[in-house]
Amino acid sequence: MDFEKISSIPPFSLGKEEKEKMLTKRLSELTEFHRKNCPEYGRMLKSIGYDEKEVRSYKDLPFLPVRLFKELDLKSVPEEEVVKTMTSSGTSGQAVSRIFLDKDTSANQQKTMVKIVSEFTGSSRMPMIIIDCPGVIKNRAMFSARGAGILGFSIFGSKRIYALDDDMKLDVGGLREFLEKYKGQKILLFGFTFMIWQFFYKELLRLKEEGITFDLSDGILIHGGGWKKLISEAVSHDRFHADLKDICGIEHIHDYYGMVEQTGCIYMECECGHLHSSIYSDIIIRRGSDFSEAPAGEPGIIQVVSTIPESYPGHSLLTEDEGVVLGEDDCPCGRKGKYVKILGRLKEAEIRGCSDTYAAK
Amino acid sequence: MPLSDDILKRVTFLVGSSDTVSRIGDVTGIEPFGEEVTEFLNDVSRELLKSPAAKGYPDVVTFGFWLRKASVNKLKERFVTDGRIRLGKGVVFHIAPSNVPVNFAYSLAAGLMTGNANVVRVPSKDFPQVRIITDALSSVLERYEELKPYVICVRYGRDSEINDAFSSVCDMRVVWGGDNTIAELRKSPLPPRSGEITFADRYSLAVIDSDSYMSAEDKDRIAQDFYNDTYLTDQNACTSPMIVVWTGSRISDSQEIFWGRLHTLVKEKYEFKPIQAVNKLTKSYLASCALDTGKISHEDNLLVRVEVNELTEKVIGYRDNSGFFFEYACSDIRELIPICNDKRCQTIGYIGDSSVFMPLIASKVKGIDRIVPVGRTMDFDLIWDGYDLPSVLTRTIAVE
């Protein structure tokens, strides 16, 4: 089953059984493909005694911890076919993931993202405001997660501006001019959750006191990157929505969950505030005690599967995030598939022992 | 950096005060295992063993027992033997590891028994055990006015100026906490005549003779012993075995029973967080790429076993904690040379006969400081990590 065929199916159209059948076929094939083409992956599967005959569902397939992509160069295509290497944005000193893309995988990532996002924004392109600085994508050779997110979403923009300069200051004049020019049109805004709050919302708040306001009630905002920093500032999901609406009138706000290791298959927040898995991917919640699947309502470790990765063995991954499945096929928004809530990073364990752990501090 | 008021203001005293510590330069070393110290420790032992608060902490109780007069006298018999005149070196500055609650107390007691005044930096984390022990010390010290400058426990954050100050007045510095902490403390100079004992990052192993194991009566006891050696400190103490080496003729029978019993116990007692499962899975996959591994048993995440077909020094780099064991079936004890020939190799916990290790030691390996039965790898002794503490913490007076 090739990806071409899968990508022709609308993203939120399959019910549980059909989706499971399709995923099981595609993901088993990918497992077999990577086993043959990525030597390290092959050794890993051998070490756990993997036997494809025992696989009844895609849920039975092995998963790799995402951290392995920081420790090893895992790829299933010859070096010369790699057209892009994506890296995760780690804080300085930390190792970063390296994801190797060939032409097909890279193209399929983009195609998939368009399909998913269009379900929320409509299929036509829009003037786009990127709430970040242009500097973040300058180095095209090494794509950071932030840069990759921006470039990925840029295909939805007919015209684009960066709202911030390289000192992270709001370009008030540029923004005003842009909004003037495209007045009455639907505008797409994109950025990272914390950046939006810190450098956009807070600046708009300050400008309001000076009597300068912006009307973004025709805007649709897509943001990702997680809530960790905002939670530490006591900014909840509801406050984020309410305060942004208050300051610039924006009402359509969609969070998304995604990672550089499975670019393309993002989980978009619907009108009901739920993150949805499309048919191209899925989330399985695993218990820490034995990696068995946790039922809806029980929080656990997030496993993600994606039908895209061919150039690297990243089709089934165990993240270090915690989440919970809220339901399947029955979200009031009408989209089929699982819908989930992300609870943040897994809590660190306080390991005893004689050697002090300096890195953690 | 002198012990100025400005520095002492940043120090919290759990035992003693800025007043006692500022006079520490005048304190002299005393006779090792002297009567007053022995009485003092015995009183501390009583205080701990009768304390309702201590009952919930087996590590505090064990420490209490170790301080009893009978136990200290036994140590005296072992270490005061040659008729030479010895005195404590003077002032010992101890840096305790941050994530083992009672280690600071053993370090302090060793310094005190050997006749020294002690300034002990306790873990920054607020373990209840630390408070129970320091409270007992303070209360008993009220009756031992003269010992007050000999028993000082302090707490402070990472502060190199305070490290400098205590280092500048000590005769010996005892640094626990591993390589990073040692590197940190080495930035603080010591006076010319002062010395240092460092407890660096180490790893340990277990060697089980399958025939001895199969004939052992109490296999549940062995499971408990091994649990104490490993899971009790998240298998992350320097003494916790990272690898289990099997010898003898009944290896597979032994493995099944040994791991089965251990697993039952772990399931019952061990507190386990999901991130530990992710860490162990990551490590086992990394090991499978880098080492000649056999089967990885991972039926549940509490206990992960990685069989290796060859014992090479590479195995050491893939060790993990929280119940992650390499396993090796061994037919000749000298197969252990590659993993013992490393200065970081510390303890061998064994089941069977300790004499089997003699050929290993005779092969002149760089490592192995302790060979103790399974269940006793954590037992503190005055010979630790290759150091004979009563000898290192005292000075010997030559009289002719």
Image (cartoon, coloured by chain):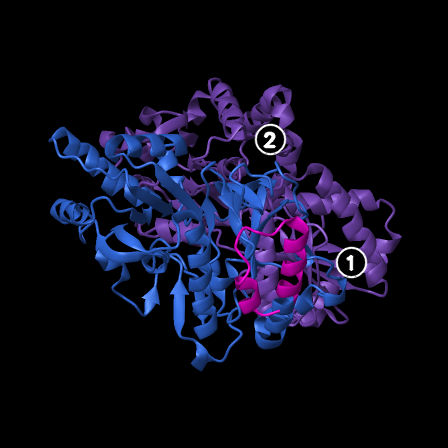
Chain colours: A blue, B purple
- Residue kind at label 2, given as amino acid type: Val
Earlier sequence position, callout 1 versus callout 2: 2
Marked residue chain, label 1: B
* Magenta stretch, overall SS: helix
Please give left or right for residue B366 compared with residue A122 in the image: right
| Up/down of A313 relative to B238, above or below | below
Residue B121 in view, yes or no: yes
Range drawn in magenta: A1-28
Instruction: State which quarter of the image contains the N terminus of chain B.
Output: top left
Give the CA separation, mark 1 to mark 2.
Answer: 31 Å
Q: Position of residue B114 (x, y in %)?
A: 51, 40
Please give left or right for residue B110 compared with residue B216 in the image: left
Q: Position of residue A50 (x, y in %)?
A: 71, 65
| Up/down of B228 relative to A162, above or below | above
Q: Which mark is residue B353?
A: 1
Q: Nearer the viewer, residue B151 or A135?
A: A135
- Residue drawn at x 49%, y 63% is A69
Q: Is residue B68 highlighted in magenta?
A: no
Marked residue chain, label 2: B
| Up/down of A310 relative to A288, above or below | below
- Residue drawn at x 62%, y 65% is A26
Residue A345 in view, yes or no: no
Per the image, the residue denoted by label 2 is B60
